Amino acid sequence: MTAIAKKLDARLSCWAPETAKEVERLVAEIIELADKDALDLVRSREKIRTTEKARAKSPNTCHERTRGLVASSKTNWAQTLRAERDDRL
């Protein structure tokens, strides 16, 4: 048995049953993907998910601008925003 297999075997008995079942499910999924030579596809998909999550966490510049207008405006910020938009059109 390899070192990683021994480590996994030892840890499975220490973890909570739900955690152990989830780890077993994930390891089984990895084995199945490896048998199909599909691990590269999974890595690509994970990279896309990571990129999408990073984009979701970064503030949208349009929203930042609107927040800035609301916070600093002493006039009707909606009219100011519309006027700027109309100037671009």
Image (cartoon, rainbow, N blue to C red):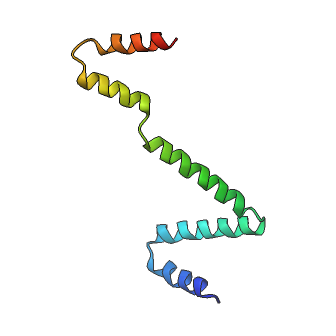
Position of the N terminus, as image quadrant, is bottom right
* Residue nearer the viewer, 80 or 30: 80
Asked whether, in this view, residue 76 is left or right of residue 46, the answer is left
Asked whether, in this view, residue 55 is left or right of residue 83, the answer is right
Above or below 56: residue 82: above
Residue closest to the far right: 36
Residue under the point 25% across and 25% down = 71
Quadrant assignment, res 62: top left
Above or below 15: residue 44: above
Q: Position of residue 84 (x, y in %)?
A: 41, 14
* Residue nearer the viewer, 23 or 81: 81
Residue under the point 49% across and 80% down = 11
Q: Position of residue 23 (x, y in %)?
A: 55, 69
Residue under the point 48% across and 68% down = 19
Residue closest to the far left: 74
Quadrant assignment, res 14: bottom left
